[in-house]
Amino acid sequence: MHIPDNYLSPETCAFMAAAMVPVWTISVRKVKEEISKPKMPLLGIGAAFSFLLMMINVPLPGGTTGHAVGGTLIALLLGPFSACIAVTVALLIQALLFGDGGILAFGANCFNMSFILPFVGYYVYKFVKSRSKTAKGEYFGILLGSYLGINAAALSAAILFGLQPLLFANAAGQPLYCPYPLAVSIPAMTIPHLLVAGVVEAIFTATIFAYIRRTSPGTIYQGAKTKTKAIYGFIAVLVCLTPIGLLAAGTAWGEWRPEEISSVVTGVKALGFVPDGMKNGFSIKAIMPDYTVAGLPDAAAYILSAIAGVALLIILFKVAGSFRKDKEGGTLG
Amino acid sequence: MDNRPPELPGWMTGEEVYIPGKDKSAFVNKSILSVLGLLSRIKTQDTKAASKYMPHAVFMVFGTLLLVVLLSFSRGFTFPMVALVYLLVLLAFMDGRAIRSILKVSLIAALGSALVLLPAALNGSAFTAVLITGKVFAGITAVNLLSHSAKWNDISAAFKRFLVPDLFIFVFDITVKYIYMLGDYLLNMLYALKLRSVGVNRNKYASLSGIGGNLFLRSSEMAGDMYGAMECRGFTGKYRAVKRFRISPADLLFIGANLAIVIAFIYLGRVKK
Amino acid sequence: MIEIENVTYKYPDSEFFALRNISLRIEKGEAVTLLGPNGCGKSTLLKLINGLVFPESGSYRFDGEEITHKKMQKPVFAGKLHQKVGFVFQQSDAQLFCPDVYDEIAFGPRQMGLSEEEVGRRVSDCVELLSIGSLIRRSPYHLSGGEKRKVAIAAVLSMNPEVLVLDEPMNGLDPRTCRWLAGFLKSLHEAGRTVVLTTHNLDLVEELSERSLLFDENHEVAADLPTGSLLDDIELLKRVNLVDECWRGRI
């Protein structure tokens, strides 16, 4: 679900960030209506909750594990605008401090996970709830909302990926960013989400919401704001909790491996591609037109490799040393 | 009223003969490991001592963002390689543990990228696959270098110089702090679940729902406490003054290196066929 | 039953030792209290005994079987250890995660594969033992500190562990409940359970356990003595910074 850096062109990233600006502005304004500006830092707590929610490994059939996002859950608990801000902050922390990637793709990721996911989920839920009036109906609304929410987000990500080879290729026709066209990216992303991730998200959302509803229904976002003073603190508390899931370092890529690879490969096969590279054989020339580092004068290239060599040696020694220190149980300090 | 406890029931007086059934509870252990890693990471960056060899956080933040942007724009291998050499040099200044931590993330990310792009590579887009993988490795190394070199408070403070409003910076700092506090709570709940995972859990999502739900409720309470504290202190929203600092030799060196990077980028761009 | 030999432990990414060269033995049926100043490593030792953390060097054996990280990855092995050793946390908040008290206490037995009838019997027995009958349909999250502690104990007891490990069980309990708990643990002990606990409540320690281990600020074991003698050695207690010069000895 998280789009890493370098898969979307900088132009795409800038565009998506620009698209988010009105969303963020409106969200901040809406949230300010509910809690006063000085109290807004409380949203940080909600962001923290969201971050942690996404760290939790959830069991999948077959004994494997995966992750849920919880965007709809947060929207249900705190309202969609607070959810937007909370997920945004959590994504920022993940990208910047945990270095998972997604600094330039931040706008795009926010668009998918802090805008589309919570809003689609929330409004589908509201729609179903308004039509059904029973507890079962409401529960169904939650399941459907979160399922559709995450699939909408996945579709959006897939489209962003798929447009890249269309729009951003070099003179030789090589894609510069995500190389998979829409015909591949859409099935590759949506199928696993329709079949697995969506179901997981739905169950995750619904069960947690049900627990909270049963234990402490008063903490849940009630919808329309009432401006009586007594409710202020109440609403502030509600608004503060926006669980944002952020994948722990490394697991994001773990998630990619089984689902994405297999569906991409089968998707490619199913669409009748015969890999050209396989026909003509795999050669280095295909990757690098020249053995020398293109564009750099020889002297610079030599100096660079010397510097790189020294740096590598130092790094190797330090890393080896750190293993030894761990074994011996501590340094002199 | 009698304060003495009643007699123990029969089943408690004997020894329990019990062989657990098989069950897959990897999700609990994995979650525990993730949260432990998270807490450890947050704690480590907080205990970092200031070093006069480190450039100031503002420059590091700017330098990192600059590098990530330039990487994204580069269309060939040369610039990423230059960037990589630069990053290797920076890495060599870090201590062994930090290097391991940084490389672990970037290697895993690069590996993941390579796997995702493998089908494309086999289909004629090998250039793209290698390019992106290389950029991913460099970009993630750069960002992790930043988060391992500077205190996170300093990173968020640095954004003030980029004209980001105080409010956002404060939210950022609060979030990190509460990730730690709630993370600790989450860890204990996961431990509790693990300790009572003595057999077959037919309803794993039910257990998770309690944990997730309690996490929310606890964060709710914390927000209420924080709200009360803010009220009591007449909080008006002024957060942090900009700290003045002197430019040090380390800063100048760092700025110089970054200028060289930009020049290299422009130069290589001109050389492009 | 519990054999810990030369165990040293450091938290990951930390320079500091939580446990340093700890050796101790606890036989079946003993009641032992771990004493020591804050941060000396008592809680870490309890986690070790429960198989949550593993020694960096040295070994931990339970019932003759060494407990290692690798072995604990296997659910069957882990499940067995967790059933035999019950752990009551210091923070009862984190220990309870079921929608109501009944489910909370039933959680363990249900996992053990007991019939719903048997589960029900165990739950009602535990509930009666701890006098929490009125709380059965309540949500654990909303209970008071003392009530949560009782529910946590019940939830652990329902699995019928051989060893009961408690981390500062008196924390946050009023004096009356403290006395009640002390008596309760004593009766469990008299029925054959092994009890290991940590506490700062020096008044109740002798009633709870015949033997006490004292930890010092270096994260080592400073003394392993019958409780009475340990508590009377005021110099020792001062040396490890457990008490200060105002401490006049127990009541």
Image (cartoon, rainbow, N blue to C red):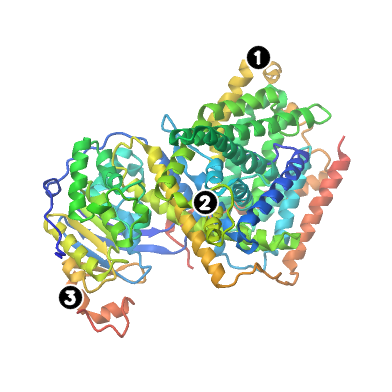
**Quadrant showing the C terminus of chain C:** bottom left
- x then y, percent, for residue A89: 62, 51
Between A208 and C17, the one nearer to me in the picture: A208
- Tell me the tag on residue A49: 2
Neighbours of disc 1 within 10 Å: few (<14), some (14-19), many (20+): few
Residue C13 seen anywhere in this rendered image of the structure:
no
Give the residue at mark 3.
C229
Q: Nearer the viewer, mark 2 or mark 3?
A: 2
Dot 3 amino acid type:
Ser
Point out the tag, 2 or 1, that comes first from the N-terminus: 2
Between B227 and A114, the one nearer to me in the picture: B227
Residue C243 seen anywhere in this rendered image of the structure:
yes
Q: Are marks 2 and 1 in contact (CB under 8 Å)?
A: no
Q: CA distance from mark 1 to mark 3?
A: 83 Å
Dot 2 amino acid type:
Phe
Chain letter of mark 3 equals C
Q: How many marks?
A: 3
Q: CA distance from mark 2 to mark 3?
A: 49 Å
- Tell me the tag on residue A272: 1
